[in-house]
Image (cartoon, rainbow, N blue to C red):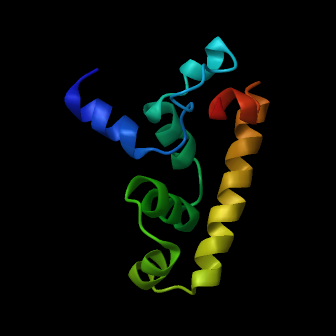
Amino acid sequence: MKDGAAAADRKWRWRTHPNRPPASGRAIRYSANCWRKLVATLPEAPRMVMVLRYQEDLEPAEIAAALEMPVATVKSHLQRSLALLREKLARRGIGESGWTG
């Protein structure tokens, strides 16, 4: 893996736990690039919140200030987006144990 790709992969929090093997071979294919594609399917505001939280590692209060929205809205976007991404993964046959290890 190239240095840039490895760094990007480390930034994304959604990956198999390093101390446990993945539940299935299909989970391995959900690399940082696949996660980015899934996140890209979200509407604009929730997508921006997800990127700022999980890629840029900002706290909800920081995101709220940057996007000029209430902290509660940021948290709602995070919660709804995570639920939607879980549903999309489930439709692809990968349950939570497949991507959390």
* Residue at point 56%, 32% (across, down): 17
**Number of on-image labels:** 0
Q: Is residue 77 above or below residue 92?
A: below
Residue at the image point whose x is 73% and y is 27% from the top: 94
Instruction: Locate the C terminus by quadrant.
Output: top right
x and y percent of residue 1 in the render? Answer: 29, 20
Where is residue 45, by image quadrant? bottom right
Residue extending furthest toward the front: 19
Q: Is residue 97 above or below residue 58?
A: above
Residue at point 66%, 57% (across, down): 81
Indicate left or right for 29 with 101 as reference.
left
Q: Residue 52 at what x, y percent from top left?
A: 43, 63
Q: Provide residue 56's location: percent of width, then percent of height.
A: 37, 59
Residue 90, image quadrant: top right
Q: As rendered, which of 57 and 35 lies closer to the eye?
A: 57
Up/down of 24 relative to 65, above or below: above
From the viewer's perspective, tell me whether residue 98 is left or right of residue 71.
right
Vertical side of 70 occupied by 12: above or below: above
Question: In the image shown, does 48 or 41 lie closer to the viewer?
Answer: 48
